[in-house]
Amino acid sequence: MKQKRINIITLGCSKNRVDSEVLMKQLSANGYEVTHESDKEKAEYVLINTCGFIGDAKEESIETILNYAQAKENGLVEKILVFGCLSERYKQELKDEIPEVDGWFGKFELQAMLKSLKAKEFEGLRPQRILTTPSHYAFLKLSEGCNRTCSYCAIPVITGGHKSRTLESLVDETRALVEQGVKEVILIAQDLSYYGRDLYRKPMLAPLMEQLAQIKGLEWLRIHYTYPAQFPMDILPVMAKYPNICNYMDIALQHISDNMLKLMRRRVNKKETYELIQRFRTEVPGIALRTTLLVGHPGETEADFEELKQFVRDIRFERLGVFPYSHEENTYAWNHYEDNIPEDVKQQRADEIMEIQQQISFELNQERIGTRVKVLIDRREGEYYIGRSEFDSPEVDNEILIKTTKRLPIGTFRQVRIIDADEYDLFAEPV
């Protein structure tokens, strides 16, 4: 009998994407025909990997589940399984509210999900996966969970404490990815800065980066999701030493006023934050800094917000995102603070920050006109090839649009000259 076709939908972050890729490999080994977010052909089974982090992400997950529940009612889908962070957090409530779903599984219930599909787990295949990214880049997940206790964050509630993978397993996986054609590996975790402390009793991000940078054929190594408190400073000389480690740092700073950092339980203060950024820029010249900020957290005064705006103006981050505060059950803030800032004020503050950042981004991009840069070609769209520099992570950062009659194969590197720029994109021609 022909095996059923399965379409996997991934919502949320790149860590979820890696989980979907691992699941796809297991299902494929069991003989299933597996696609990822395909709308081109009918799949009998749909598996939805959900996000349960903040309000907007939860709404998107529920809306997606309801859309497929309707598709099932219309006879377009036979079976729906839901897994990931949202069902880890709200499994029983969801089960009661959306009975059309055939199975609810938490974030770490791979075996149970496979069993429900009459499939078995091939332990020897872990951590192999089927990439859902373009074949020239891949995410590498270093750990699960988080040991931080930030007031607003539900991640430790959902995923539990920090659990690092062994350094050897990560080196082996990276080597295998490079052998199959991956040129760029992006290190991810809930908190990269903590990597190794549980397994090795000391931070091991720097030794890991050093080993990965020496893998032949790995052209770019990029780090995402670092944390400012107890930052592993020994990664900075490693970044400066190896040309294939991107001069790029993603560090979630959230706020700058000492009042807010204390209320948020960030274990770092304003002075330490400014000093940390200074060290980044001194020890890794030309580094691009990406951060995320949180506005509207309980207790944020107008003075705190003005301080945050000045911080953004002072530092001139190359990349920046901002989120309005979401009051999440079972977090420290939920239990100890009143969600006392109106939603429209939260959104207004987020908009103000992004207006400041938009102008900064425009000015920084204008400064790049006339420069030459190494670009990785990601795809073709209409008359443009779309690429990225070492300062740009996929899907979240600037893109470089290259108009040319020359053929630029996807997944190759090219030298280009920047000829124009707007707030978030650069325009270039091949050199």
Image (tube, rainbow, N blue to C red):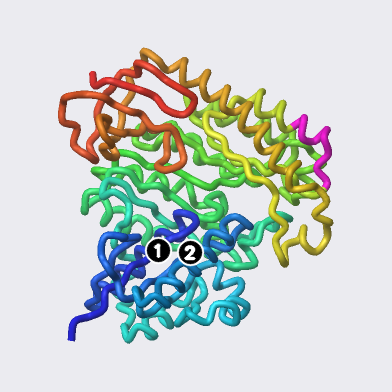
Q: Nearer the viewer, residue 335 or 256?
A: 335
* Label 1 SS: strand
Give the CA separation, mark 1 to mark 2.
9 Å
Q: Which amino acid, by three-letter code, is at mark 1?
A: Ile
What amino acid is at disc 2?
Answer: Thr
Question: Which mark is on residue 9?
Answer: 1
Write the residue at 32% across / 52% down: 133
Which residue does the image show at 53% across and 59% down from the upper left? 60
Q: Earlier in the sequence, mark 1 or mark 2?
A: 1
Residue 302 within the magenta-colored segment of the rendering = yes
Location of the N terminus (image quadrant): bottom left
User: Residue 312: image x %, image y %?
Assistant: 65, 29
What span is colored magenta in the figure?
Answer: 299-307
Residue wearing tag 2: 64
Say if mark 1 contacts mark 2, CB within 8 Å. Answer: yes
Position of 334 with respect to 69 (left or right) is right
Front one among 246 and 171: 246
Q: Secondary structure at mark 2?
A: helix
Residue 42 x/y as whole percent: 27, 69
Please identify the residue farthest to the front as the structure is shown.
Answer: 74
Q: Is 197 above or below relative to 157?
A: above
